[in-house]
Image: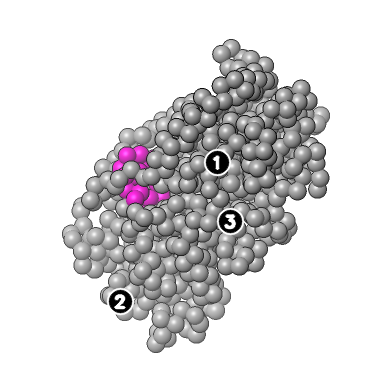
Amino acid sequence: MTGVNHLGNATSPYLRQHADNPIDWWEWGADALAEAERTGRPILLSVGYAACHWCHVMAEESFTDPAVAAVVNANFVAIKVDREERPDIDQVFLKATQALTGTGGWPMTVFCTPQGRPFFAGTYFPPTRRGPQPSFTEVITAIDEAWRNRRAEAEAGALAIAEALADAFVPSAGGTARMDVWKVQQQLSDAFDPINGGFGTAPKFPFPQVLDALLVKGEAASVDVAQRSLEAMARGGIHDQLGGGFHRYTVDASWVVPHFEKMLYDNALLLGAYTRGWRRTPDHDPTLRWQRERVARGIVGWLAREMRTEAGGFAASLDADSLDSLGQQHEGIYYCWTPELLTDALGAEDGEWAAQVFHVTNAGTFEHGLSTLQLRGNPDAERLARVSERLLSERFNRYAPFRDDKVVAAWNGWTIDALCNAAAVFGEPEWLELARAAAEYLWQVHVVDGRLRRTSLDGVPAGVGGFAEDYGAVALGFARLGGVLGQADWLDRAVQLLEVALELFGADDGGFFDAGADAEKLYARARDVADNPTPSGTSTLIEALRLVALMADRPDFVERADQAAVTVRGAVESNPQFAGSALVDALIADEARTGLRPAVAVVVGGDSEPLSDLVRATWRMAPVGTAVIAGPADTTGFAHHFEERVEPGVYVCRGETCFAPTSDLKELRTALWSRVGGVAAPKAAPAAGCHDDEDGDH
C-alpha cells in the first residue's frame, strides 16, 4: 500500500486512512523525531482512532485541505498516532492535554518541541472560528509564530510541563491499611442515577467493571444498583437491539442516543457483566433472566458474525459513521429507523408493532427524523426475535460501517476470558471454539521470540511491543481457556507471559508501569492505576496473577499481586467509579479475610466433551475468583491437581483445606462457599434472588 506521505505502509488501518492526506504525516518513531531535530521544527502530534466520529470530521475539514497542509508541511513535523496501537503515547500526551486545557479527548492535538515535550494542546479544532474557539488554521499559524519568535519560552515551558507531569504517573500513596469496602460500595451507590440507571450524567458510559464489583458480594442494595443499570442499558439506544453488542457511550443521560462506534473491549467487558448479572438474577424472575441472556447471546452473535477477521482474532472496532443511500457519510445512519422504513421492511402490521416496541417515532429520537431503537415493555419473545431477524436482514443491505481489522492483544484477551465464562454459564461449546481460535491466533502471531506484540493486521504483527494490559489480559484469557478445556498448555503459556511481564513492568513500589522497561522512552513512563475505560494494566495483571497462581501453584505470583494491590488502593478509595477492576480484587480480598479465600475447583470425570453438566454447575455456583479446572480423569498437564483424583466429582480446595469430592449440587455449593479460618464475616442484607440451586452466585 502506498500514499503521498509516510503512512502508506503503516500496520494501523487508522493511519492508512490518512495516507493520502496532503499533510506529510509521519508515524511516531525514531525517523520522525530525527526529522524534527534536524529541521528544528515543532511537532504537530495528532492522536485518534478509526472508530472516532470527530476524528473523521477534523480529518475531512482540515487534514484534506491543501491550504492547511501547506502551512503544516512548511512549519511542522506532523506525526499521526493510533491511540489503540500506542496507548503509551496516548496516555502521556492525554495527561499533558488535560493539564494544559482542563479537558481531554479525541482527536487530540498536541504541539511539542523536537524532543517530544508538549507545550500546547487541544482536541478538535474547526476549519473556521466558532465563537471563542479558534480555527485549526489560526492555531497552527499562532504556534508557528510563537515558535519562531519565542522559542526559548516555549521550550522552557515544555520542560517544566514534562517535569511536573512525570510525578502525575506515580500512584498516590496507598489508602488505608484495610479498605472499608462497604463504604466504597456506598460511594458508588451515591453516584447511581436512580431514574435512568448507570452513573453520573451525560455523556454516560457503561462502566462494566463497576457493575462487576457491585455484583461480587451480593449485598442487596449494590446488586440492585447493578441490575437496574444493566436493565436500562439493555433497553436503551446504546444497545444494538438488532445486531447485538453495545455502542461506546451515549450523549444523553437516558441511554437513548449513542456515539455509534462499537468497540471490542466494551463488548468483551459487558459480556462478562451481563453473564454475571444473569447469575445474580433470581430464577423466579424468568423475564429478567431472559433479558440478561438475550443481551449476552447478542454480544456473542455480533462477535462471531461481524468481528472475526479472516486471519484470526477479533477486529478492534466498527466505525460510528457509514454511507447513506446517496453515498453521503453520516454518523449512526446504519443503525437508525423511521416508522416508514419499518413498514417497508416488515409490512403494516409488524411495522406498526415494531415502531411501538422500539419507540420509533415520526419526530425521531436522534436527528433528521431518525430514531435509535429502544426496547419498550416486555414484548412476546418469539415475535421480537422474528421481527428483529427480518430487520437485521434488511439492515445488511445498507452500507456497513468501516471495520478496523487491527487485532489488539489486550482486547482479544478480555474477549477470550468473557467467552469462556459465558460459554460455561450458558452451556455453549461453540463459544469456546471462538475463544480457542482467537487464543491460537494470539499465540501464533502476537508472541514473537517470547515477547507479546500489541497489534497485528492481516496476520502480520506490528513492531510495537505489548503493554501491561496486553500481557495481563492475554494471560488471563489463556488461563481461563486452559481451565475450561482442561488443556494445560494454555496455562503454561499464561505462566510464560506473566514471568516476562514481571520483568518488563515491575515498579520499585511493587506496582506496575504500563509501558515496559524496554519500551521507547517518552517524556514520562506511562503508568495509570485507574480504569479508563478498560481495566488498568496494573489491575489486569493482578487478576491474571491471582488466577494463574491458583491453577499453577505459584505462591510467588500471589505475593506480587498483593504488593501491586497496595498501589491501587488509593485510587479505589478516592474514585471507585474509575477503579472498578481494582475494587473487584479488594472485595475478593475482603472475603478472604473472613475465610472465603479463592478456591480451586477441579472437575474430574464425566463427559469427555467440554461443558458437562457438572462443569456448568460448578462455574455457575463458584464465587468470584475461583479457578475452575475441568477435564476427564486422565487430563494431562494439571498433574498436581488431578493426581490420585480419579473418582468422578468436583474437588474443592481452599488454601490447605480440601473437601470430599462430590457430584451432589447442594454439597458442591456448600464446599464452594464454606469459609475456612479467617475472622467472622460481617452480616449483610442478602441480595434478592440468592438461592441454593445450581444457578446460585452468592
Q: Nearer the viewer, residue 614 or 176?
A: 176
- Magenta residues, as a range? 567-585
Q: Which residue is mark 1?
A: 90
Of callouts 3 and 1, the N-terminal one = 1
- The amino acid pointed to by label 2 is Cys
**Callout 1: helix, strand or loop?**
helix
Q: Where in the figure is residue 355, as x and y percent of width and height?
A: 63, 31
- The amino acid pointed to by label 3 is Gly
Residue that extends furthest to the left in the rendered view of this protein: 680
Q: Tag 1: Cα neighbours inside 10 Å, few (<14), some, or many (≥20)?
A: many
Marks 1,2: beta carbons within 8 A: no
Q: Where in the figure is residue 524, as x and y percent of width and height?
A: 48, 43
Q: Where in the figure is residue 468, as x and y percent of width and height?
A: 49, 55
Q: Which residue is mark 3?
A: 465
User: Which residue is at 71% across, 37% downward?
Assistant: 25
- Residue 658 numbered mark, or none: 2
**Callout 3: helix, strand or loop?**
loop
Image position of 349 (left or right of 507): right
- The amino acid pointed to by label 1 is Asp
How far apart are the two marked residues, 1 and 2, measured between alpha carbons?
47 Å
The main secondary structure of the magenta stretch is helix
How far apart are the two marked residues, 2 and 3, measured between alpha carbons?
41 Å
Q: Where in the figure is residue 326, as x and y percent of width and height?
A: 81, 29
